[in-house]
Image (tube, rainbow, N blue to C red):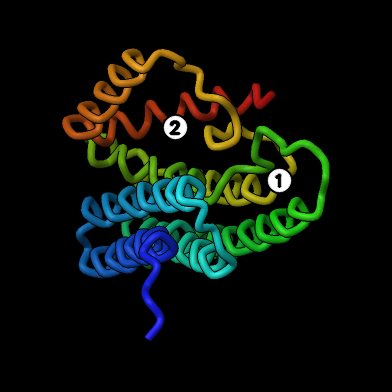
Amino acid sequence: MKKIDFKVLLPNVITLSGLSFGLSSIRFALESDFNLAIVCILLAGVCDVLDGMLARHLQSESDLGAQLDSLSDFLSFGIAPGLLVYMSIFNQESSIGAFACLAFIIFSCLRLALYNVRLEASKSSDGAPEHFFTGIPTPVGAVLILLPLTHSFMGYNWAYENLSFVAGYIILISALLVSRIPTFSIKRKQFFVQSRLAFLVLFSVIALSIINFLWVTMNILAVIYLLQSHSPS
């Protein structure tokens, strides 16, 4: 019997854990537990970051892992947030809301397909790797379309009174997924905090903020990301 190589297996296990969180998000959305549904999507995002980091660190990147990652991303950051926003904000009664959420899911699929094509092309290219993404990454797009829902958790119910605006906002984010606009990528550029102590302090502040002020922190980090995306070089 062939011995199991846990070095190769571990990143895929984390990817499947992220997929499980995405499926759980759909379940909680169907049960109208929208807070927990968003938390599951965020946990899927953590898994999405960890599996890639581990695969690169352990030098265990594989074609299977890449395909699993794309499938997991589509469910966790395409289908799950689209369904969640439709069931929570549009209450299954808005045609324009259904169109917007469907557009987000479809464009998420296109985004991941285009990313895979570019990834394969980069393997045979001798040029220097780009230090930014093209278009908004699918996990970021998922967080951005969830922001109006997080506002309701903070007591601001404007989204329920402006369904057409929210639908237009979702369609805009959907278009940005497949745009040619360069956006900030923390994976592809050197982190701006060089000191280990400064990094630990920053990480602790962000972690404590997420634990105690999750919805506010989500919105602040989203704004910081959008501001950083204007300077990808």
* Quadrant in which the C terminus is drawn: top right
- The residue carrying pointer 2 sits among few (fewer than 14), some (14 to 19) or many (20 or more) residues within 10 Å by Cα, namely some
Answer left or right for 18 relative to 166.
left
Sequence-earlier tag: 1 or 2: 1
Q: Distance between the residues labelled 1 and 2?
A: 18 Å
Identify the residue at image location x=46%, y=27%. 223
Instruction: Name the residue carrying label 1.
Output: 179
Kindly identify the amino acid type of the residue bearing the numbered disc 2.
Ala
Out of 42 and 172, give the one closest to the viewer: 42
The quarter of the picture where residue 179 lies is top right
In the image, taking residue 219 as reference, residue 120 lies left or right, namely right
Please name the residue that numbered disc 2 is placed on. Answer: 222
Q: Which residue is drawn at 31% across and 29% down?
A: 217
Residue 79 vertical placement versus 175 (above, below): below
**Name of the residue lying farthest toward the right:** 126
User: Residue 22 occupies which quadrant of the picture?
Assistant: bottom left
